[in-house]
Amino acid sequence: MKMNSTVYSFWLAAVFFTFAFITGCATVPPVDWNSRVGHYTYAQAVNELGPPNRQARLSNGATVLKWFRQPGAPAALPNNGMNNGFGVGQTINVGLNDQYLQLTFDTNGVLTAWSKNY
């Protein structure tokens, strides 16, 4: 009888660890950002993704938020006046291969555009 309880305990532990391994290794499907345009809010983004690494308000009142996923090699690039959400003449410290998610929200805080480079 002692042998049966030992074997039972072993198999029970094996099933538990197999289930835990499979569950722990499950991948989360990627977010479909196109389906969120027009109804995803600024508050939802900050709640889901945490505080952004960069934030800027554009001249039209829109807000651009940027979350960095993996920093690249550091570099300081001058802003040449292109509309990237930062002031003209301001030096921007960016990585050459930064991986980021950028979300743009209108004046009502609703997602209007997104981009990512990963």
Image: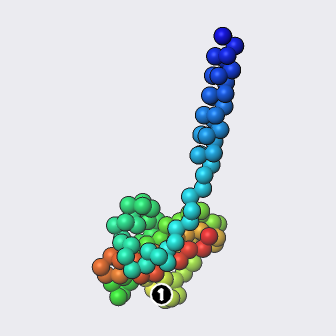
Between residue 96 and residue 2, name the one nearer to us: 2
- SS at badge 1: loop
Occupied quadrant, residue 27: bottom right
Q: Which residue is located at x 63 percent, y 45 percent?
A: 22
Q: Quadrant of residue 117?
A: bottom right
Kind of residue indicated by mark 1: Asn
Quarter of the image where the C terminus is located: bottom right
Rendered view: 83 above or below 111 = below
Quarter of the figure with the N terminus: top right
Q: Position of residue 93 (x, y in %)?
A: 54, 71
The residue lying at 44 percent from left, 74 percent from top is 36
Residue drawn at x 62%, y 49% is 25
Residue 56 appears in the picture as rendered:
no
Q: Is residue 98 above or below residue 27?
A: below
Q: Please provide percent x and percent y for residue 31.
A: 52, 68
Mark yes or no: residue 34 visible.
yes
Image side of residue 39 versus residue 17, left or right? left
Seen in the image, is 86 located left or right of residue 10? left
- Residue drawn at point x = 43 percent, y = 65 percent: 52
| Colour style of the rendered protein structure | rainbow
Q: Which residue is mark 1?
A: 83
